[in-house]
Image (cartoon, rainbow, N blue to C red):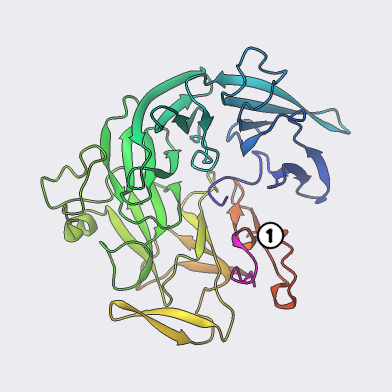
Amino acid sequence: MSSCRGLNGYEKLALMNTNHIIDTETLEVVHKVNFEWPVEGQALRWSPVDPNTIYYISPGNHPDSAAPNCPIGHPKLMKYILSYDGTTYSGAKELIQCFTEYISIDKIRSHEELSEDGRYIVLDGLTSNPTQHHVFSYDVLNKAKGATIDLPADATHAPDFVAISPTGNYVLIQYNILGMIAYNRADMSHAGQVAMSTGHGDLVVDTDGTEYYIQTNSRNGHLFAEAHYITRSRIPDGIIFENDGNGVEGIGRGKDIDVDAAASIASGGTTPLLRLSWFSSDMHISCRSIHSPGWCVVGTYGEKNGDSHQKWENGGYVPSIVPEYPLEREIFRIYLDSTPDVPNVERLAHTRTNPPQCDYFSTPFAVPSPSGTKLMHNSAWNFASGDCTVDAYEMKLQ
């Protein structure tokens, strides 16, 4: 997940997808998160303020010694606390909340960061009879559930992911069709439309304190549709509509409500940062350098030289067999003051990954450290020989 930090607060430890924890200096495995088999843990993420704490979701399929009073069949929000005796790391589990009102907490849609103060998380709880998504914020410090928005489990309203804004002020829902909508965390009232696209992206606070959603517009037919851009959308009001200026009412927006592109751009609500020569959603964006604001990291992937590309020309896709385009299958840093005419980009590495020959998890989920001095990414470097083994890499940044 490029939208979740890989390294802990003091950047000594890195959490891997296998739940192993490695030392970032020696690259040795120093611990594996122990859920006490057969108990499971899902959607692990570091606390942004406590370098020894990991939050995770337990699906509740088995009895758990850390939550003896939570009925089987109900999910739990848990905390895993690391300790170090000078030689060995150990861990202890602690129950935060047992959600008896839900049959599950969606581990994929809910796998996003906490607010930067380490207080709020957003979760997607699933109910039965009727089946609904309940999206809500949760205060992990005070163990308090916030207001809930209930969504029908249909293709239009089902979330792609849910998240808290970095400041903790807004609950953000990226819908599969409706784009990203912001809600006031305190009461889940509608706050604005952040973006219309459903492409990959991440959340960031700029140097002036403004929150943005940085994403690819590859699935956006409303703004800058003539080319492929990486865009910056203001939270909560990156999009302005032509109707009454209030944007989306609740979640029931129809496609007949038109985006006021001129007003959205003129107001600074949505701004293009970089124009790309190829048109695809083949990228991941990460803005996890919370103590070094003003930039994000982009990891791109795609076909190798000589493969068939889908090139975007004159409002449509054009099949083309060409060499790789600039910034394709690379990792680069993009600064938030970049513009298409004056790009502010720093190229960092080649990844060589070719997902059509391997799989999605071989793509470069590049993630910077909190200080912005380190970067981790993965790659199936040897895809040409048929070896799709995924390796992790660490890079030190200037």
Question: Splitting the image into 4 quarters, where does residue 70 fall?
Answer: top right
Compared with residue 378, is residue 212 higher up or lower down, i.e. above or below? above
| Above or below, 111 relative to 366 | above
Horizontal relation, residue 186 to residue 113: left or right: left
Instruction: Tell me which segment is drawn in magenta.
Output: 350-360
Three-letter code for the amino acid on which mark 1 is drawn = Met
On the question of residue 177 being in view, the answer is yes
In percent of width and height, residue 270 lies at: 29, 56
Please name the residue shown 73% across and 30% down the image. 35
Q: Which sits in the foreground, 155 or 115?
A: 155
Dominant SS in magenta: loop
Find residue 174 and report its horizontal and vertical position in percent. Answer: 38, 46
SS class, disc 1: strand
Question: Whole-percent x and y of residue 9?
Answer: 64, 38
Between 199 and 235, the one lying in front of the other is 199
Residue occupying image coordinates x 66% and y 17%: 67
Query: Magenta span has 214?
Result: no
Residue nearest the observer in this picture, 367 or 95 = 95
Can you see residue 12? no
Crowd around label 1: few <14 · some 14–19 · many ≥20 (10 Å): few
Estimate the x, y position of residue 197 in percent, counting from the top left: 34, 56
